[in-house]
Image (tube, coloured by chain):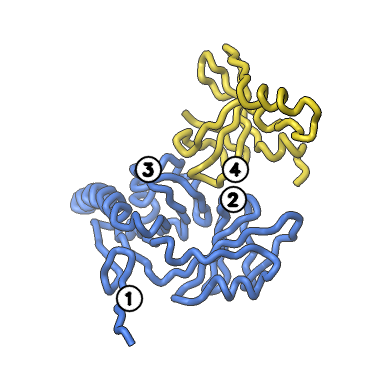
Chain colours: A yellow, B blue
Amino acid sequence: MLIPHPLLGLRDAQEFTYLGDASLMHRPDPAREDAVAAFADYVFLRDNPAGVHRELWFHEAGDRSWLVVTRDTTTHEILGAELASDVKLGGVQ
Amino acid sequence: MTDLTPITALGGTVARSEDFGVLRLTEQPDLSLASLSLRKGQGVPSPFGLTLPGVGQSSQAGEYGAFWIGRDQWMIEAQGTQDIAAMLKAEVPEASVTEQTDGFATFEISSAGGAGPLEAVMRKLVNLDPQAFEPGAATRTTLEHISVFLVRRAEDRLAVIGMRTYAGALWHALSTAARRIGAQTDGELAK
């Protein structure tokens, strides 16, 4: 399986490690009044879609960047990959 | 004072070198390494007169070299045994500099038969397109599950920089591949 790294081009999936749902990037604000409930959802609740899924992959044996990879969970087809920092910060570094 | 004998990553007192047909595999114990990471918002410096290369590239200036290892991160190389981290920190005091020399072992594969045999070895060892990995290209990848930096010094020379504790395993992997490809090229030359 090859992952289209936005900087390095097609790279072997063995160079990457998988973390999970890309929604993990949106950590709730601990100062919120309902922070306990929000964190319970953040830590324990995941969607489990059959189809297109956005997920975090780490290029561990490469340039050590975090990617948001869009994958079809029914076919394992990789539909795209973006740098997680670009997704989170909108390209502003 | 205790009389200490320096040894190479492979445990010898001199660098190991072996020929396999047109291919030569050499240990390079005299390369000093330090990593350079920019702080947030910092402009790209040019230590030792180096133009720090872009994604997946390397550059050279005299006896110094640099290759890209991540966003706003480079490995800086110098020929010879020297305190490269201190020298680099003096060049770019505002950046983060870490000594790397003794963490790594460097091997070079060179080919007396042009790019062909070298690319054949690459095809055996790493999941990268050797033809897209042109002279000047540099990347980090895995080689027999060992994390390595590859730097294509020239069309017929490839540097493999891996963790020093894996030096023996890396030599085994590189020499096994080079022996097989070397034997094939021997046959071709004999025809």
Which residue corresponds to mark 2?
B70
Of A74 and A79, nearer the camera is A74
- The residue where tag 3 is placed is B145
**Residues at marks 2 and 3, CA–CA distance in whole angstroms:** 20 Å
Label total for image: 4
Residue A65: image tag: 4
Q: Mark 3 and mark 1 in contact? Answer it, CB < 8 Å.
A: no
Name the chain under label 3.
Answer: B
1 or 2: mark nearer the eye:
1
- Tag 2: residue type? Gly
Q: Earlier in the sequence, mark 1 or mark 2?
A: 1
Query: Quick one: label 2 or label 3, which is nearer the N terminus?
Result: 2
> Can residue B188 be seen?
no
Q: Is B74 placed left or right of B13 in the picture?
A: right
Which residue is depicted at the point 46% across and 46% down? B141
User: Real-space Cα distance between discs 1 and 2?
Assistant: 32 Å
Q: What residue is at 61 percent from the left and 22 percent from the top?
A: A44
- What is the C-alpha distance between the residues marked 4 and 1? 37 Å
Q: Chain of mark 2?
A: B
According to the image, label 1 marks what residue?
B6
Q: Amino acid at mark 1?
A: Pro
Q: Residue A76 versus residue B3: which sits nearer the camera? A: B3
